[in-house]
Amino acid sequence: MPDFAEPVLAFLREHEGWAIPIVFLLAFGESLAFVSLLLPATVILWGVGLMIGASGMAFVPLWLAAALGAALGDWLSYWLGYHYHEPIARMWPLNKHPDLLPRGHAAFEKWGWAGVFFGRFLGPLRAAVPLVAGACQMPQWSFQLANWLSAFAWATWTLGAGAFGVEALKGWI
């Protein structure tokens, strides 16, 4: 595990009451455009999943916090893209790739909400997909459908692998 993750996990162990807001903020930051470049929260959330399984912490409240944080982070990224699509197209890193928005628009025309859903599971694209979806004026109802469904699936995968993997290993040992 990376060095930066251990202090966060140690804090969660000592202050379990803070686990829900911290998991929410990590998932929110991981899903928020531009912030996600500075906050590699997925690896920390995998560690939280392991800690859930090892310590017996309740899974459902942390799962809900991760899903809500991820969905709201994507919602804000979409909103920023939708309302500020022209200025955002001139900002880094989009200004370095002028073909990105036209390609994104073509991808959303072809794949629709499935592009948003599966984009959540591709680390480098996780926070960029909602921003580009908004900038390309993707219809909000189809974006939100994919956003909320993928947020709960992502939270299950991200936290569940560690939480339930530890439980399975306990049964084998």
Image (cartoon, helix red, strand yellow):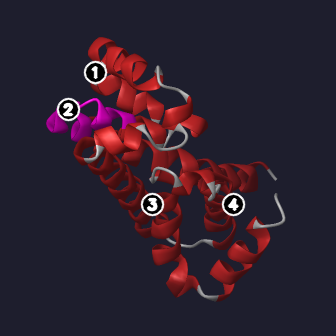
Count the marks: 4
Please tell me which residue is depicted at 60% across the width and 71% down the height of the picture. Answer: 56
Please tell me which of labels 4 and 1 falls first in the chain. 4
Q: Which residues are magenta?
A: 132-145
Secondary structure at badge 2 equals helix
Q: Which mark is residue 47?
A: 4
The answer to whether marks 2 and 1 mark residues whose Cβ atoms lie closer than 8 Å is: yes
**What whole-number distance in Å separates the C-alpha atoms at marks 4 and 1?**
33 Å
**What whole-number distance in Å separates the C-alpha atoms at marks 2 and 1?**
7 Å
Q: Is 43 placed left or right of 160 in the picture?
A: right
Q: Amino acid at mark 2?
A: Ser
**What whole-number distance in Å separates the C-alpha atoms at marks 4 and 2?**
32 Å
Q: Position of residue 128 (x, y in %)?
A: 47, 39
Of residues 127 and 47, the one nearer the viewer is 127
Query: Badge 1 is on which residue?
Result: 112
Query: Badge 2 is on which residue?
Result: 142
Of residues 148 and 50, the one nearer the viewer is 148
Main secondary structure type of the part rendered in magenta? helix
